[in-house]
């Protein structure tokens, strides 16, 4: 965890240096558009660490709203969705899929034109708690992400991001549940 925090801080510092140079060259203008943006799309993920012992992969979808704080550079995000983790077959017995409803809020920062760094935190609610043997109904979730907005015309974009998502324990004596995920969403301005 300490290594991840240090790596995230180093990445943010390097990206900020590039941002200063890019803003000096283009006058600070970006093409992300101003105003509230909505984006909707699928999420795909691979469990990592001990979480991969019980689950193969995940698929889901989410809706996110981006509210501008600093025009074209800093946004507050609100994100909600559904995620299904497909259980592995262990010793010939198929496990139960884990179904989560994550609700997160955070910040999205554009240090360079169309490239962003995003961090979110919130809760992941377990919809099938008794089926998977969870002792908790919800878990703390955090998700650092990097991504890029590909313009598809006007104020419309394809928002492609890669994130690490960490969930706290689903059981009292369990371990944290981590995921590497890809989100590709259609983004449009209101």
Image: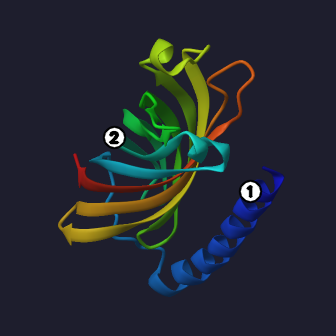
Give coordinates of residue 151: x percent, y percent.
26, 70
Give coordinates of residue 24: x percent, y percent.
55, 83
Residue at 41% x, 73% y: name it: 29
Disc 1 crowd, CA 10 A, few/some/many (<14, 14-19, 20+): few
Quarter of the view holding residue 185? bottom left
Residue at 26% x, 63% y: name it: 157
Residue at 38% x, 36% y: name it: 84
Give coordinates of residue 65: x percent, y percent.
35, 41
Q: Residue furthest front?
A: 92
Give coordinates of residue 39: x percent, y percent.
29, 48
- Is residue 141 placed above or below 182 in the rendered structure? above
- Is residue 42 placed above or below 134 in the rendered structure? below
Is residue 178 visible to us here?
no
Which label belongs to residue 4? 1
The C terminus is located in which quarter? top left
- Is residue 42 placed above or below 124 in the rendered structure? below
Quarter of the view holding residue 85? top left
Q: Residue furthest left?
A: 153
Q: Secondary structure at mark 1?
A: helix
Q: Residue 82 vs residue 124: left or right?
A: left
Q: Secondary structure at mark 2?
A: strand
Cα gap from disc 2 to disc 1, whole angstroms: 25 Å
* Way the structure is coloured: rainbow
Is residue 122 visible to us here?
yes
Q: In the rendered image, which residue does mark 2 sit on?
A: 62
Disc 2 crowd, CA 10 A, few/some/many (<14, 14-19, 20+): many
Residue at 23% x, 53% y: name it: 188
Q: Residue 21 vs residue 44: left or right?
A: right
Question: As rendered, which of 20 and 151 lies closer to the eye?
Answer: 151
Question: As rendered, which of 167 and 22 lies closer to the eye?
Answer: 167
Q: Residue furthest right?
A: 2
Q: Earlier in the sequence, mark 2 or mark 1?
A: 1
């Amino acid at each position: 965890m300490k290594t991840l925090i240090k790596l995230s801080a180093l990445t943010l510092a390097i990206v900020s240096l590039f941002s200063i140079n890019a803003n000096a060259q283009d006058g600070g203008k970006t093409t992300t558009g101003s105003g509230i943006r909505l984006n909707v799309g699928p999420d795909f993920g691979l469990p990592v660490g001990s979480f991969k012992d019980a689950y193969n992969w995940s698929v889901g979808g989410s809706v996110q709203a981006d509210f501008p704080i600093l025009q074209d550079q800093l946004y507050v995000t609100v994100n909600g969705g559904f995620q299904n983790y497909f259980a592995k077959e262990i010793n010939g017995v198929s496990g139960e899929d884990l179904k989560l409803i994550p609700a997160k809020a955070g910040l999205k920062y554009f240090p360079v034109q169309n490239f962003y760094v995003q961090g979110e935190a919130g809760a992941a609610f377990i919809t099938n708690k008794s089926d998977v043997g969870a002792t908790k109904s919800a878990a703390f979730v955090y998700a650092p992400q990097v991504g890029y907005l590909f313009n598809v015309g006007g104020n419309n974009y394809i928002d492609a991001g890669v994130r690490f998502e960490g969930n706290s324990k689903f059981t009292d004596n369990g371990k944290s549940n981590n995921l590497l995920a890809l989100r590709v969403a259609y983004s449009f301005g209101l």
